[in-house]
Amino acid sequence: MKLMSPMERPIPVDIIPSHAYLSEQDQVTLFGIGHPMTILTNHVQAGQFIYDETVEIFGRLKRSLPVHVLGPNWEKSHVEVTPIEAQFLGLNLDEVKTGRLDSAAPCRLVGPQGEVVLAHGLIVPKPHLTMNLDDAHRLNVQNGEQISVVLIGEHERQLDDVIVRVHPTFRLRLELHQGYARDLWISRPTHARLLT
């Protein structure tokens, strides 16, 4: 039997709901000193989790969008949403590398105990492929590289400009925001493979 090459191995696809990352100080401002954040569920990536707590996100308009907080605390607070959600908030944004805040839009976060204004705080993330160092070596890719993948199925669909993210704790996953699930009709567990 012919062995499958590393490039052919199926990679799980995860649809990541819109969410907020909070710094320790901003979390205190939004939820109060000593507030015990409640873990709703674990994130697919080791050491990360989704809190039951939510914050309201405001852009240029008066309407807001509730999103869950992801933990643990991050160095800088920011929010990741879909293109349609950004438009709902009055913002027209291009997709950028997750965590890249130099071109992020301003937004306001409102919690039960206070609010925080972020000058550069809201982005629409590009698709990204997470992996550890062994995966990167096996697949012959580097952190920050842009690659193409194919969603496996009866009708294969290609995604370009996928950002490779390498970290020792990362699990091999293709992470997409919910807009891709809608546009590509991803309604069941899906896998992808690197395009050679």
Image (spheres, rainbow, N blue to C red):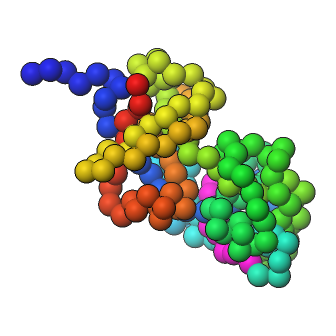
* Residue 11 sits above or below residue 113 on the image: above
Q: Nearer the viewer, residue 30 or 137?
A: 137
- In reply to whether residue 67 is colored magenta, the answer given is yes
Q: Where is the N terminus found, in terms of image quarters?
A: top left
- In reply to whether residue 101 is colored magenta, the answer given is no
Q: Nearer the viewer, residue 76 or 175?
A: 175
Q: From the viewer's perspective, tell me whether residue 67 is left or right of residue 29.
A: left
* Residue 109 sits above or below residue 20 on the image: below
Residue appearing at x 40%, y 40% in the figure:
150
Q: From the viewer's perspective, tell me whether residue 172 is left or right of residue 3.
A: right
Q: Position of residue 75 (x, y in %)?
A: 78, 45
The answer to whether any part of residue 33 appears in the image is: no
Residue appearing at x 75%, y 57% in the figure:
93
The answer to whether any part of residue 92 appears in the image is: yes
Residue appearing at x 64%, y 68% in the figure:
84
Q: Nearer the viewer, residue 75 or 86?
A: 86
What residue span does the magenta drawing correspond to? 64-71
Q: From the viewer's perspective, tell me whether residue 46 is left or right of residue 30.
A: left
Q: Where is the C terminus found, in terms of image quarters?
A: top left
Task: Please identify the quarter of the rendering in which residue 10 is found.
Answer: top left
Q: Position of residue 49 (x, y in %)?
A: 55, 55
Q: Main secondary structure of the magenta part?
A: strand
Residue appearing at x 90%, y 57% in the figure:
119
Q: Position of residue 194 (x, y in %)?
A: 41, 32
